[in-house]
Image (cartoon, grey):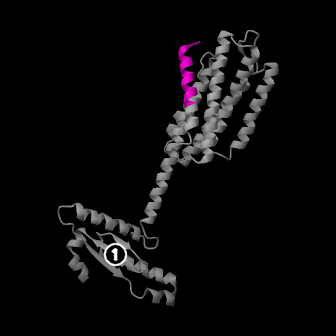
Amino acid sequence: MDNNYTVTIIICILSMLSLAIDVGKNTILNREDIKWFRISFILCAAGAICEYFGVLFDRTGCAPQKIHWFVTYIEFSISPFLAVFLARSCGMKKTIKPMSIFMTLNVILQTVSLTNGMIFYIDSQSVFYRGTEYWIYIFFCAASFLYILFVFALIGIRTKLRNFLCLLLIASITLIGQAANIIDGSINSGYMSICVTAVLLYIFIQNMLRHMMIEKITVEQEISNHDALTKVFSRISFDHKIEELDKKIKDSSTDVKFAVCECDLNNLKLINDTFGHDKGDEYIIKCCRTICNFFKHSPVFRIGGDEFVAIVQNDDFDNFEQIKKN
């Protein structure tokens, strides 16, 4: 056996098992995605083990024919099916059922091959041979890869194509590893490429979800910091501004120049009762616009139904007396 191949497979298996144990810790994935990633990692490890022992039995003839046959059968059954589990781990649900049925057909054909050796067979010396219908296995592997590309394309669309190049590079790892193994059976790179793809995909999905969460939090913060009706700063922003000014006053060795101007709208209740709340809202918006026109260089906050506050600073502070007269 090639020592490099042995070490590589051991590293892949240990990596998959480590991730299967650790996948639920310090993650933003939901429980369903965690479960499917864990299954994917365990299957990757199982497939890599079967591939290794298949190669070992083939090169040394140290195992009975039936054991070698069974190990190869498990490997050939798992490999194309992994695309389904990885896709489900990425949150894909709609395409899983038809693809699962399709990949189950591969398992059925592999089972039939155990009796007639049409896809592969193991001779009496425990040596592996490709059968006359080996192309069936290649066909399902190709379908698996195309499905992964399809899933990656959907993920790319979900992330507005920001990371599409990264997804293509991850997909190319599987393509190169599987293609090399199919073209030359002595190159045992199939499960190594699958394990690497699984790790990178896990990292990618984590980063994608984290980025989406940060974007959502940013949008929600932006909404909470602004008044929904007038679009000026909200009461929450006013409180933060007060804290910021307090800190500046405490930390600054020089004077912090600003003024506070409170504007209280008259007769809002009368307008609401007489003309309705729509007219009341229109009145608030127009008054707010007037206040903002006075304080063009200062933040304006709506701190109550008819109360506005301007923190007067910069040019507005320098011209505050003129603004008051206006």
Q: Residue at x 61, y 15 (%)?
A: 186
Q: Residues within 10 Å of mark 1 (few under 14, many from 20)?
A: many
Q: Amino acid at mark 1?
A: Val
Vertical side of 180 occupied by 143: above or below: below
Quadrant assignment, res 100: top right
- Give the x, y percent position of residue 268: 44, 86
Quadrant assignment, res 265: bottom left
- Give the x, y percent position of residue 87: 63, 40
Q: How many marks?
A: 1
Q: Nearer the viewer, residue 41 or 193?
A: 41
Q: Main secondary structure of the magenta part?
A: helix
Q: Is residue 163 left or right of residue 174?
A: left
* Magenta-drawn stretch contains 166: no
Image quarter where the N terminus lies is top right
Q: Is residue 21 left or right of residue 296?
A: right
Vertical side of 9 occupied by 325: above or below: below
Image quarter where the C terminus lies is bottom left
Q: Residue at x 21, y 69 (%)?
A: 257
Quadrant assignment, res 250: bottom left
**Residue 91 visible in the current orientation:** no
Q: Residue at x 63, y 35 (%)?
A: 40
- Give the x, y percent position of residue 27: 52, 45
Q: Is residue 232 left or right of residue 255?
A: right
Q: Nearer the viewer, residue 73 or 22?
A: 22
Magenta-tinted stretch: 1-16
Mark 1 highlights which residue? Answer: 309
- Give the x, y percent position of residue 77: 71, 28
Secondary structure at badge 1 equals strand
**Residue 249 visible in the current orientation:** yes
Q: Nearer the viewer, residue 151 or 48?
A: 48
